[in-house]
Amino acid sequence: MNYFKLEGKEFIELNNLLKVTGLCDSGGIAKMLIADGRVKVEGVVERRKRCKIRAGSVVEFQGEMIEVQA
């Protein structure tokens, strides 16, 4: 399990989370992978590229899990 801190922000968009954690090389690639249904949020496939990910959420992508913390 990897962790990402919001550092005072209310949320981060899903495509940006994949980019800043290094799971995707760019936001464009992240958007394509999300649209293809390859990303899960709380165990459910999420296809909204700009889905707001808040503290406590768990994102899954290619066998990696990221827990978002406040």
Image: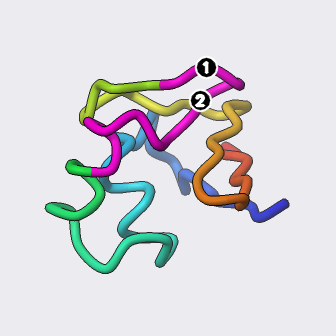
Identity of the residue furthest to the right in this view = 1
> On residue 41, which mark appears?
2
Identify the secondary structure beneath mark 1: strand
- Decide which of 51, 24 is in the foreground and name it: 24
Which of the two marks, 1 or 2, is nearer to us in this view?
Answer: 1
Dot 1, how many residues are within 10 Å of its Cα: few (below 14), some (14-19), or many (20+)? few
> On residue 44, which mark appears?
1
- Decide which of 23, 33 is in the foreground and name it: 33
Identity of the residue furthest to the left in this view = 28
Residue range in magenta is 33-45
Q: Residue at x 71, y 61 (%)?
A: 64
Q: Are marks 1 and 2 in contact (CB under 8 Å)?
A: yes
State the image quarter where residue 49 is shown. top left
Q: Position of residue 58 (x, y in %)?
A: 70, 37
Q: Residue at x 22, y 49 (%)?
A: 31
Identify the secondary structure beneath mark 2: strand
* 50 with respect to 62 (left or right): left
> On residue 58, which mark appears?
none
Q: Residue at x 44, y 43 (%)?
A: 9
Identity of the residue furthest to the front in this view = 36
**Is residue 41 covered in magenta?**
yes
